[in-house]
Image (cartoon, helix red, strand yellow):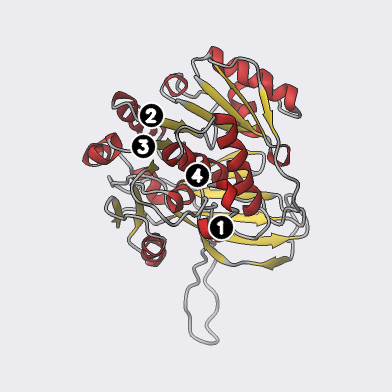
Amino acid sequence: GLAGGSGEGLRALCGRSGWGVGVASRRSPGQPAPPEAPRPAAPARCLWQPGRWRGLAPRRGRGRGRGRVQGAGCGRARARARGGPVWPGLAWPWRHGRRGGGSGILYDRPGQVGKDSFGNDYVENLKKNGISTAFVGQTTDAATGTASIVVNSEGQNVIVIVPGANLLLNCEDLKRAADVICKAKVVVCQLEITPAVSLEALKMAHASGVKTLFNPAPALADLDPQFYTYSDIFCCNETEAEILTGIPVGNLEDAQKVGRMLLERGCKLVIVTLGAEGCMMISVEEPIPKHVPAGKVRAVDTTGAGDSFVGALAFYLAYYPKLPMEEMIRKSNCVASVSVQASGTQSSYPYRKDLPRDLF
């Protein structure tokens, strides 16, 4: 994601999205059903994290991409399903996705979608929100990335990700966007594209003196150590923090331990988001941890709240660079708090005109 440019319409960040697909064969009335075919080998492997399953679809040929842009289907249920039973759902609206795409609602960014109806719709959605699509390509080598989300009555979620076209990004695509990357005010990266490509983007930005913000999501236990040193700001949530450090984060004290460990690995400034409890920040310049609380609100759907926070933080870094970091985090908390009070991902993010004036 690239923060910079004119960007007058602030939408704080988009949430993850997804959809389910079924295929049925056609046969004449009365024609018996064909015998069941042997079950094929699984075409993808699933990685599980608390609150997130990640399905990795196989690559179909060599493709191109410039970032993660995906759509989302959000299903609502009264409880989180365990293996076995079928649970009744309350709704399944299609929405535009979060993570990279969510950040993109806030600022211009390179991206890649499939050459399909979902990709077409997503490109139009970016244009509608005033986002440049100059580096958003469409490929026939993979479908638009998607994610399916199940949200329970408490607003918590489980997510299944199929990256699709997002995994077709390569470093040649970055080179074509080098002028944009190197002239940006802020470059935001995460891990829902190939990690090596995210790292290369951080290096390009760092070499040009561009501020870098890295969100290690979904987290990798064996994350390349260079991510720590090439990130001006390293922002993770409790789950990601535990995967990266092995320290379960159940309270502010645990988050402080994580922050200190990440500083030892080379981070300059660490933010650990704590949901309703706000954030913990610690930096090389200010090694005493600070707690930045969040306002109390009734959460309807927390999907995309972290993305809303990261996108808002990128906005403040780009347009209000002289604000103290603690104040940027406080304001970003406020934007994220607004997003959890409505269902959906991108659809829950407020426009600048709808936010309190004191945030600007």
Residue 263: quarter of image: top right
Q: Amino acid at mark 3?
A: Lys
Residue, disc 1: 350
**Within 10 Å of the Cα at label 2, are there few (<14), some (14-19), or many (20+) other Cα atoms?**
many
Callout 3 crowding tier (Cα within 10 Å): few <14, some 14–19, many ≥20: many
Where 163 falls versus 321 (above or below)? below
Which comes before the other along the chain, label 2 or label 1? Answer: 2
69 relative to 273 in the view: left or right: left
| Label 1 secondary element | loop
Q: Can residue 18 be seen from the camera position used here?
A: no
Residues tagged 2 and 4 counted as in contact (Cβ below 8 A):
no
How far apart are the alpha carbons under marks 4 and 3? 13 Å
Q: Which residue is mark 3?
A: 185
CA distance separating discs 2 and 3: 18 Å
Q: Relative to residue 52, is residue 216 drawn left or right?
A: left
Q: Reading the chain from its start, which is encountered first: label 2 or label 3?
A: 3
Whether the residues at callouts 1 and 3 have beta carbons within 8 Å, the answer is: no
User: For this rendering, which residue is in front, 84 or 216?
Assistant: 216
Sequence-wise, the earlier of marks 4 and 3 is 3
Residue 251 lies, in percent from the top left, at: 76, 28
Would you name the residue on which mark 2 appears?
A: 199
- Label 2 sits on a secondary structure element that is helix
Relative to 231, residue 133 above or below: below
State the residue in front, 298 or 75: 298
Estimate the spatial distance between the alpha carbons at disc 4 and disc 1, rounded to whole Å.
Answer: 12 Å
| Disc 2 + disc 1, Cβ < 8 Å | no
Residue 311, which numbered label?
4
In depth, the one of 192 and 337 nearer the eye is 337
Q: Position of residue 353 (x, y in %)?
A: 52, 59
Residue 142: % across, % down: 36, 53
